[in-house]
Structure formats: structure tokens, C-alpha cells
Amino acid sequence: MNIVITGGSKGIGKAIAAKFAAEGYSVFICSRNEDSLSKAAASIDTKNGEVRFFAADLSTREGVAAFSRWLSQAGIHADILVNNAGDFVPGSVHNEPDGALEKMINVNLYSAYHLTRALLPEMMKRKSGHIINMCSIASLNAYENGGAYSISKFALMGFSKNLREEMIPHNIKVTAIYPGAVYTDSWKDSGVSESRIMQVADVADTVYQLANLSPQACVEEVVLRPLAGDL
């Protein structure tokens, strides 16, 4: 079984890659930085599986085309696609930097939209596949200091809901995951205790369980929040 993970060099994406590799999957990760990808791949225990990587900026059409072409030329089809690539620019609608919305839409929405469209024809031909979109609790409610980010994540939720309905006749599962705060590098200097928020393994384990239900079961949405509530 093959799993393709965007934003796979660190954080949640890397944790998902490690979980599936440990279970014998062939894992294919992508992010912008080749050095980070190489280090991530080398640090993952593959056991019976493998981890391969390709560096591309998926916020651009050219980057998506390069990555999907690499997969195709290597004869790799995606049994599972995890659209995890994302970025965060803090600020509110009235004061965030010019271009914040365009950047957030390109990274958080268009990367998932265009890569999914590139890989869907093979899934539809096989009448099999699972697309998992890493949304956010910012997809569900207005997010403090997250204007353009929240807007882009609302859009990713809308993409997921539409895609779910479209793929029913093609036997392809679509799941949207809405994580709250997860302890990654971005939280290390925040002053927030690691014990206060979720671990990346919590999300990775959830994705693995979702991907291994019976063929006739599709979990459409999952909300994961810290036990003590959102920050």
C-alpha cells in the first residue's frame, strides 16, 4: 500500500509518515526543503516499508506538476493521499500583511486542490482510494489572530465536503481532520507546556485508524482538541 503525504518533513506530516512506514506501507513525502526531507526520511524506521521523498513547492502549479510527474514516472499510485502541507501567517483581516490571503490560499488550499486533481484519475480508474485533508479547528470557527489562515482553512473544509459527495460513486473515501493545538516546533518557544496540548502521534494514530477501517466505512470528519480545551 502506498501513502503520499505533503508537508511530510516535520511535525504532523513526519509523524504520519513514521506511523505508516512502521506498519509496512510505502511512504512518499513532499515538502519544499530537500535537506529537511532527506533528514526526515533517514530518521524514519521503515521496517518492511520504504520512505522516498521529492522536494517541491506545492503552493505553485509548477511544483504540483513536478511532484505528480515524479510519482507517475516512478509508477507510484496513491492508495492514500494526505494533504497536510500548510502555513500560518498571523494577523487579523484588518491588519495582516498584504498578500497574506493569497499566500494562505496558495499553500493551504490550492496545494490540496491541484494535487488531488492530479492523483484522482488513477484512483477513479481503480475505484479505490482515500483522500485525507488536514484542516484545522480554524476551519470551524473564527480563529483569533488568524484571519487569512482561518479563511483558507474554511475553504479547505468546503473543498473536502464537496469532494466527499463527488467521490461517493467512485468508491473513494474523503476525510477532513480538524486538529486543535498540536505540539510541533512552532510551539517550542511559546511558553506553552508540552503536556498542555496534543502530540503529533495523536494525529498520526488517528489517521492510521481512519485508513484501516472496513472498505464500506468512511469517516467524513474528525475533530481533535486538547483535553483542557483550545488555547
Image (tube, rainbow, N blue to C red):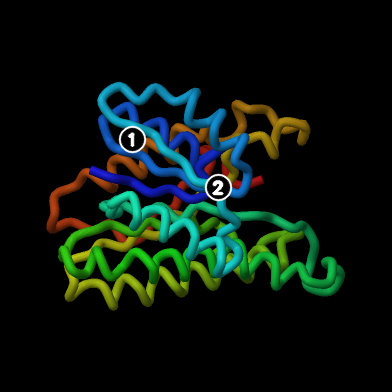
Find residue 91 and name its label: none
x and y percent of residue 216 in the render?
Answer: 13, 58
Residues at circles 1 and 2 in contact by the CB criterion of under 8 Å:
no
Q: Say left or right for 14 vs 107.
A: left
Secondary structure of residue under mark 2 = strand
* Mark nearer the N terminus (1 vs 2): 1
Q: Where, quadrant-wise, is the C terminus in this rendering? A: top right
Q: Decide if residue 175 is on the left or right side of residue 185.
A: left
Q: At x 65% / y 55%, what residue is drawn?
A: 87
Query: For the point 26% across and 61% down, which residue is it?
Result: 173
* Foreground of the two, 58 or 112: 58
Q: Which residue is mark 1?
A: 20
The quarter of the displayed image where residue 108 is located: bottom right
Would residue 142 be seen by someone viewing this image from the given angle?
no
Place of residue 185 in the rendered image (x, y in percent of width and height, measured from the top left) = 67, 34
**Residue 52 at x, y percent in the picture:** 41, 38
Residue 114 visible somewhere in the drawing: yes
Dot 2 amino acid type: Ala
Q: Which residue is rendered at x = 44% and y = 53% of the image? A: 223
> Could you say which quadrant of the image residue 208 lies in?
top left
Residue 186 lies, in percent from the top left, at: 69, 39
Picture disc at residue 55? 2
Q: Quadrant of the N terminus?
A: top left
Question: Is 166 on the left-hand or right-hand side of 176?
Answer: left
Amino acid type, label 1: Phe
Mark 1 lies on a secondary structure that is helix
